[in-house]
């Protein structure tokens, strides 16, 4: 979401928000050299690898790669977007920013905070109905499910009466604009222009985020409505694929335990909290989405997904395998026995039984393997087992998510696959290649040597480009020395390419470089993380001038190579005539030699640090050559 605050306002807020002060509110910092160190709030560690550099106004963690300026710190710590981080820091500094600057989206519709205020009013009103005369049925149901009074209060459980206009009338009395109620999804319009209550005769579960904003509601019918559960419709504030129920109450436990337990239902979540599993959240009737995972991974290193039926388990296994392969977050799966849901298990058998379910949780990869081998009758030996292994590997090889992993991450995953199947790492690699060749939509790799060498030279050049950006972030003035070879288009990663391009633009405009302000040009947390990681990588390497000279040579090689490739292609296509053949043949020979030399060199430099690798979580190994990675 684009912020509408002016850049002058943003700068004013930045000036007023010293990063050491802001971070100190969350992390206990100790002075160390020219900066400060502390235990990273974004991953679990025992020795501090989180540092804050006051003169650059940035933070960076050598353990997990988190990094950025003061806005990014608040974005990550409070799990909010840029405009919200801006208003948090503005409020802290006593700077007035017009709500409309950060909130309003062009038209004159209600803003996020207006909707939130309407929701907040509704929470109080639903709660009053729940404790009132009209709420006796709701209280009976809650009692029956084993939810106690303390949980009712903490989760702000409410009741929506069954007649069609209770909320509409109460809101009119409280002078809440009708337009707001409808934008919040609390009412629905009739043809004649009047409105009726969207939630009727339902137990109400307010959905609250980590900043204690009421985003929307879930409602469980207490009658015989065909829709057992109903959620608020999508609004400016509410997106059910991105929200998790109970985040506000689980946040602290996440920080302590670094593990999230994800259940399916509101009552499952409430009863888990009531029985001491405070790190529990619930999806809102959807499968776990990548957006959920991105939300959770800011707080935890591992997710335990609890489901209560075989069909749900099947779906959960596929979704979590994709998440494990794609997002690099550890996902384990646990089934509640006897087709009970977690709430029923907790009430009937207590917290010990639920703890045992969590302990029995199985890694997503293993879970999927069990499923596949079950299809081959257990498949412990012989042809059945071979077919099961092939099927399983085909599943892994075919995963687009695995393809987007960086080599290190992929190596780690293949290692785990090997352990699971009892096969050596290179045997897995060999089998995967065979399976990949059998997969029809994956054409066999080109047999041509030259294109392969060219592509290796290209990745060498891409690595060189990245190294250049790393060095320039530390010594921006060196841009002039590399300007003619500097080519962001060589970079395969979108975000990295954009960072390189913005850097070039600033240098061409001769703007004075400031790292924190540079980070501020990108609103996403991932860009900030990448920039600080690149900066740190460059700082570690040092020797910026020599580094840039070396990279410049590698970029030139690629350029010459491409020119040689053109000649080779010309010979092949016949565009180069007979009379030129002899000259071209020499060129061809030289070109091939060059290709081979560069190919060999590129092979040696194959430790190309792709951004996911740079930014990989600590479990996935970390930046090469940094002794502080070991914890
Ligand atoms: Zn960290």
Image: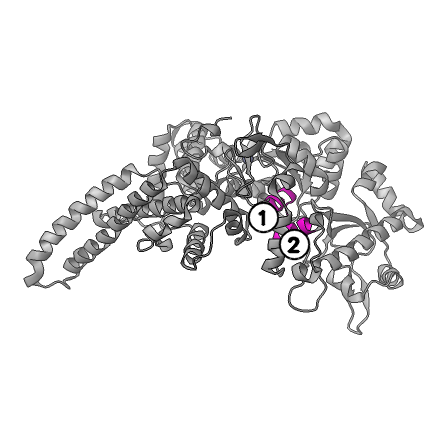
Q: Residue at x 63, y 42 (%)?
A: 77
Q: Inspect the magenta stretch and tell me whether residue 84 lies in it.
A: yes
- Disc 1 crowd rating (10 Å Cα; few below 14, some 14-19, many 20+) is few
Left or right: residue 501 versus residue 48 is left
Query: Where does label 2 land, which residue?
Result: 239
The answer to whether 478 appears left or right of 254 in the picture is left
Residue 630 sits above or below residue 441 on the image: above
Q: Is residue 240 visible?
A: no
Callout 1 touching callout 2 (CB < 8 Å): yes
Looking at the image, the residue that sits furthest to the right is 133
Instruction: Please identify the quarter of the rendering in which residue 411 is found.
Output: top left
- Residue 331 bears which disc, if any? none
For the point 16% across and 48% down, which residue is it? 592
Marks 1 and 2 sit apart, C-alpha to C-alpha, by 10 Å
Q: Is mark 2 within 8 Å of ligand 1?
A: no
As drawn, the residue found furthest toward the bottom would be 192
Percent across and percent down for residue 363 are 54, 32
Q: Which residues are magenta?
A: 71-90
Q: Residue at x 50, y 47 (%)?
A: 515
Image location of residue 297, percent across then percent down: 58, 40
Q: Nearer the viewer, residue 319 or 118?
A: 118
């Amino acid at each position: 979401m684009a912020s509408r605050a002016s850049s002058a306002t943003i700068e004013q807020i930045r000036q007023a928000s010293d990063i050491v002060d802001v971070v100190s509110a969350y992390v206990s910092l100790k002075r160390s050299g020219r900066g400060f160190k502390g235990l990273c709030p974004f991953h679990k560690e025992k020795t501090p690898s989180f540092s804050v550099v006051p003169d650059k106004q940035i933070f960076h963690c050598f353990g997990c790669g988190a990094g950025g300026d003061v806005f990014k710190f608040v974005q990550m710590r409070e799990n909010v977007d840029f405009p919200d981080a801006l208003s948090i820091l503005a409020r802290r500094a006593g700077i007035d920013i017009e709500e409309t600057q950060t909130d309003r989206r062009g038209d004159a519709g209600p803003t996020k905070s207006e909707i939130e205020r309407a929701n907040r009013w509704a929470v109080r009103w639903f709660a009053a109905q729940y404790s009132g005369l009209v709420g006796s049925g709701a209280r009976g149901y809650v009692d029956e499910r084993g939810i106690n009074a303390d949980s009712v209060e903490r989760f702000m459980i409410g009741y929506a009466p069954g007649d069609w206009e209770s909320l509409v009338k109460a809101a009119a009395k409280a002078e809440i604009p009708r337009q707001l109620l409808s934008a919040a999804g609390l009412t629905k319009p009739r043809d004649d222009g009047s409105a009726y209550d969207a939630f009727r005769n339902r137990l109400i579960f307010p959905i609250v985020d980590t900043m204690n904003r009421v985003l929307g509601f879930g409602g469980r019918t207490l009658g015989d409505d065909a829709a057992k559960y109903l959620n608020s419709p999508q609004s400016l504030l509410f997106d059910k694929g991105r929200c998790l129920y109970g985040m506000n109450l689980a946040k602290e436990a996440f920080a302590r335990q670094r593990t999230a337990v994800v259940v399916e239902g509101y009552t499952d979540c409430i009863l888990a909290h009531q029985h001491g599993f405070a790190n529990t959240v619930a999806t809102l009737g959807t499968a776990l989405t990548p957006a959920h995972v991105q939300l959770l991974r800011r707080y935890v290193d591992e997710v335990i997904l609890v489901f209560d039926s075989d069909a749900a388990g099947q779906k959960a296994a596929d979704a979590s395998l994709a998440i494990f392969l794609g997002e690099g977050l550890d996902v384990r799966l646990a089934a509640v026995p006897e087709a009970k849901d977690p709430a029923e298990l907790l009430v009937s058998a207590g917290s010990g039984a639920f703890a045992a379910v969590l302990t029995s949780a199985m890694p997503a990869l293993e879970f999927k393997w069990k499923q596949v081998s079950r299809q081959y009758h257990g498949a412990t030996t012989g042809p059945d087992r071979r077919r099961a292994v092939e099927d399983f590997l085909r599943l892994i090889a075919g995963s687009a998510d695995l393809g987007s992993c960086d080599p290190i991450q992929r190596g780690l995953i293949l290692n785990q696959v090997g352990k699971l199947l009892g096969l050596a790492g290179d045997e897995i690699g060999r089998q995967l290649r065979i399976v990949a060749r059998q997969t029809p939509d994956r054409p066999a790799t080109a047999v041509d040597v030259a294109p392969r060498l060219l592509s290796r030279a290209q990745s060498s050049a891409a690595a060189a480009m990245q190294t250049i950006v790393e060095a320039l972030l530390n010594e921006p003035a060196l841009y002039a020395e590399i300007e003619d070879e500097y080519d962001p288009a060589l970079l395969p990663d979108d975000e990295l390419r954009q960072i390189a391009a913005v850097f070039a633009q600033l240098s061409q405009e001769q703007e004075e470089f400031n790292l924190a302000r540079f980070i501020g040009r990108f609103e996403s947390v991932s860009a900030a993380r990448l920039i600080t990681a690149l900066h740190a990588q460059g700082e570690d390497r040092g020797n910026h001038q020599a580094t840039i000279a070396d990279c410049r040579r590698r970029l030139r090689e690629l350029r010459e190579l491409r020119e040689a490739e053109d000649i080779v292609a010309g010979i092949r296509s016949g565009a180069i005539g007979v009379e030129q053949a002899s000259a071209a043949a020499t060129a061809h020979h030289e070109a091939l030699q060059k290709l081979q030399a560069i190919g060999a060199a590129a092979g040696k430099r194959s430790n190309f640090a792709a951004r996911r690798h740079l930014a990989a979580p600590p479990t996935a190994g970390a930046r090469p050559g940094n002794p502080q990675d070991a914890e």
